[in-house]
Amino acid sequence: MTLDQVNAGGQARVVSISGSGRISKRLMEMGVVPGIVITIVKSAPFGDPVQIRLLGYSMAVRRSEAQAVTVEVAVAGAGALV
């Protein structure tokens, strides 16, 4: 699953970031690295950009950027990812 497929309010742990272009490099510089837990805060009215929260701060990413991030999602009832 990719980050753009996670619903608002959902949490996901980053598994990998695909690509070797400037988008993946920018995401990694901002802290989106394997093992980090990301919370989807909300989406803009037409779905782009998406506000995410990680490492104590919020940032906005485009859906196309979120598609480069492979994640595993917390299962309901299994507790939050930590």
Image (cartoon, rainbow, N blue to C red):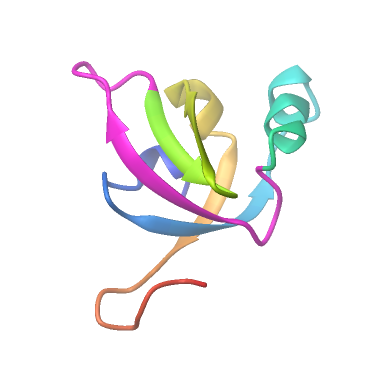
Q: Is residue 23 left or right of residue 64?
A: right
- The part of the chain drawn in magenta is 32-49
Q: Is residue 23 above or below residue 31?
A: above
Q: Where is residue 7 in the image (x, y as percent from the top left)?
A: 27, 46
Q: Residue lying at the far bottom in this picture: please name it.
A: 78
Q: Which residue is drawn at 34% across and 18% down?
A: 48
Query: What residue is shown at x 38% (from left), y 20% (from top)?
Result: 49
Seen at 46% across and 71% down, the residue is: 81
Q: Does residue 55 show up magenta in the picture?
A: no
Residue 77 horizontal/vertical position (percent): 25, 82
Q: In which image quadrant can residue 63 be found?
A: top left
At 80% from the left edge and 29% from the top edge, which residue is drawn?
Answer: 20
Looking at the image, which residue sits at the far left? 45
Q: Does the magenta stretch include residue 38?
A: yes
Main SS, magenta region, reads loop
Considering only vertical position in the picture, is 34 above or below 21? below
Q: Is 40 placed left or right of 13 in the picture?
A: left
The percent coordinates of residue 9 (x first, y second) are 27, 51
| Nearer to me, 47 or 60 | 60
In this rendering, position of residue 35 left or right of residue 37: right
